[in-house]
Image: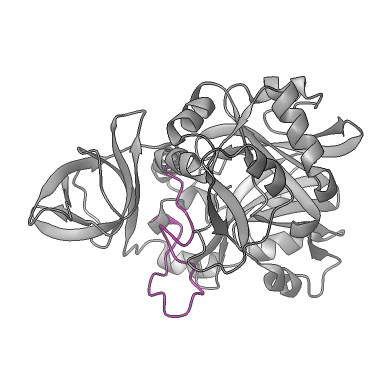
Amino acid sequence: MIFPADDMIADAPRATPLYAAAASVSKANIWTSVNGWSLARVFTSVEKEYNAVRNGAAIADLGALFRYAVRGSEAAQQLSRITTVPAPSLDVGDSARGLILDDEGCVLDLAEVSRLSGDLFLLTTPTSHARRLQLAARGLDAVGEDITESVAAIGIFGPRASEVLGAAGMKNPGDDVAASGMVRGVETAARPIQFGATDGVELVFPASEALTIWDRLMRRGKVGPIGLDAMEILRIESGAPRPGVDFIAADRPGSGMRRTPAEIGLPHLAPLDRGWYSGRRGLRHVATRPQHRLVTLSIDDDRSVPGAGVFAKGKPVGRITSCTWSPAIKRVVAFADMSRPTGRNDYEISIPSQVDGRVAAKLYETAESALARAFREAHGAATESRR
């Protein structure tokens, strides 16, 4: 699951259940606000935290995401009214990614659904959808409850994630299914998740026990924390677009940036053959007429900035929406919103500090772009694998 954009203005960010624990180990003391919650951007150094996830493991506070318990005999149908996730076909313990679309098939948000029992689901989204859930329950034996403030969530990312869980006394979930258990007497649910292309596990538990679980993982699992800046590198490297940064929700007034799943590079999360979901009818009319294309580029430079122009044959074709230096490929990796999609693979990026200065760039295949390409090659028959 991906965080939305940082809050531009936050007078008094709230403390997540894990804030006290995170603050106690933050040497950099650099913070930001997401959805009104305080989150650490850096704990020690971006490079150290990035390498920890690539080569070992690190834990992250995921408390700024919205979570809803959706229950009832028709809870799956309720979720199908607001997400593209195939909730009715999920077995107990399964999780799947999807999107939230408007009636015209344009993207409102990302979504992830886990089936915890026969009639209980967990919906996780970057931004709030309480009203949408309420409306979707009309006429159904289902109800959605916002549990964001009553639970805490920790993400454990990296190849050592299973080892960390075992050391903390937590049952490790399988590749596709969730698990539940007790950590020092605290009932905890664990499910496999991904942050971009990075495999991990999410622990969800009562907010009152947040410090207990964090301390247990840090001491017994011998793992350190990761902040948003290092997670941003992992996100862009994986090709996962960020709401409010790489695309704007279709219901934002005057955004002028209404995008379909294909236009943000995620057609595989809303296949037209998946069955009924809200926005599917509208998507049928716009899916074949993409006006934009969100792509990932590798830039032959050690810097770039959001807003930098993208050129093909000397003509402007788009702009950079987010970018980062990638330690993995020793280049800048960037998302580019292309207003004039082309079949080319040789671009130039403007350098703001230089008059008429430009550097070369090429398309960069990511985990998400590989899924999208496979989906397109299968003519829309591919479906998103369960996570």
* For residue 102, above or below residue 271: below
- The number of discs equals 0
Tell me if 135 is positioned left or right of 362 in this view. Answer: right
The residue at the point 80 percent across, 27 percent down is: 170
The residue at the point 78 percent across, 70 percent down is: 137
Q: Check the image and name the residue furthest to the bottom.
A: 254
Q: Which of 272 and 313 lies nearest the eye of the viewer?
A: 313
Whole-percent x, y for residue 278 in the image: 61, 66
Tell me if 95 is positioned left or right of 360 in this view. Answer: right
Q: Would you say the magenta stretch is mainly helix, strand or loop? A: loop
Q: Is residue 260 magenta?
A: yes
Visual colour scheme: one colour
Whole-percent x, y for residue 113 in the image: 69, 50
Does residue 162 appear in the picture of this structure?
yes
Q: State the extent of the magenta-drawn residues as a range.
A: 239-262
Tell me if 360 is positioned left or right of 238 in this view. Answer: left
Whole-percent x, y for residue 238 in the image: 44, 39
The residue at the point 60 percent across, 62 percent down is: 35
The residue at the point 11 percent across, 59 percent down is: 315
Q: Which of 265 and 126 lies nearest the eye of the viewer?
A: 126
* For residue 387, above or below residue 10: above
Q: Quadrant of residue 213?
A: top right
Quadrant showing the C terminus: top right
Q: Which of 295 and 271 lies nearest the eye of the viewer?
A: 295
Q: Is residue 160 magenta?
A: no
Tell me if 44 is positioned left or right of 176 in this view. Answer: left
